[in-house]
Amino acid sequence: MATSPDVTERLLSWVRIDFSPPHRPPQWWRAAMATVLSMVGALVADAVLVAVGVHVFPATRGYVHFGFADYAKLTVIGVLVAGAAWPVVARISSTPRWLFFRLAVVVTLVLFLPDVYIWLRGQSAQAVAVLMAMHVAIALITYASLVHLAPLRAASSARRDRVDLGQHAVAGAPPAGGHVGGDLLGPGGAGDH
């Protein structure tokens, strides 16, 4: 069954995908640097959460998923996917931080499903809670690193001539010249409506 263009347009509008952002994506080297720093930060956070989890819940000592090799492999894959997704989201949305934040939330919730499954299959609730905390920490570190260390860039002068920036100002469009500002939940951030 084919989807009508009207339904598709409404869906894309609802998720804020418009394929005509008034900004340019982050520079590739900044996105790469932010991805590497996200990876390091996420792995450190994982290790800290495992250490705290084992200290608070001694029965979880030796838990198979608390081994560095076990969680590091999945953390690296997840951060690499997010690092690749950020420039793509920046290219397809006029409000990329809004969309990227919501994608991070959805992905984190989906990643809870295997944790819930192993808990239902008899794994320790305390260990599973630590795994879930690791997912949240990875998402927060990765989101913040990517959007702040690999910021959007202002549109080129030719692009600015073609786009009416006035219509995008409410949606957190970048100012003329420089990168898009805003804190984690402020203007241009995840909390924009």
Image: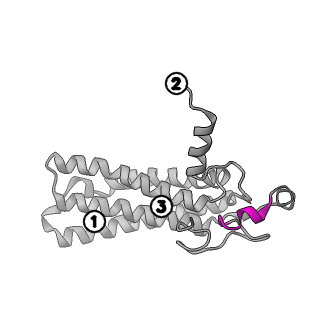
- Magenta stretch bounds: 164-172
Circle 2: element type: loop
| Residue 134 point in image, percent of width and height | 34, 62
Circle 3: element type: helix
Dividing the picture into quadrants, the one containing residue 48 is bottom left
Disc nearer the start of the sequence (1/3):
3
Q: Which residue is mark 3?
A: 39
- Disc 2 from disc 3: Cα separation: 42 Å
Q: Residue furthest top?
A: 1
Dividing the picture into quadrants, the one containing residue 68 is bottom left
**Mark 3: amino acid:** Met
Q: Split into 4 quadrants, where in the image is the C terminus?
A: bottom right
Residue 33 lies in magenta, yes or no?
A: no
| Residue 16 point in image, percent of width and height | 60, 53
Task: State which mark lies toward you, 2 or 3.
Answer: 2
Q: Is residue 35 left or right of residue 157?
A: left
Mark 2 neighbour class, 10 Å CA radius: few under 14, some 14 to 19, many 20 or more: few
* Residue at position x 61%, y 58% in the image: 96
* Residue at position x 83%, y 60% in the image: 160
Residue 166 lies in magenta, yes or no?
A: yes
- Disc 2 from disc 1: Cα separation: 48 Å
Q: Is residue 122 above or below residue 48?
A: above
- Disc 1 from disc 3: Cα separation: 16 Å
* Residue at position x 41%, y 62% in the image: 138
Which label is found at residue 50? 1
Q: Is residue 95 above or below residue 20?
A: below
- Labels 2 and 3 touching (C-beta < 8 A): no
Which label is found at residue 1? 2
| Residue 130 point in image, percent of width and height | 26, 63
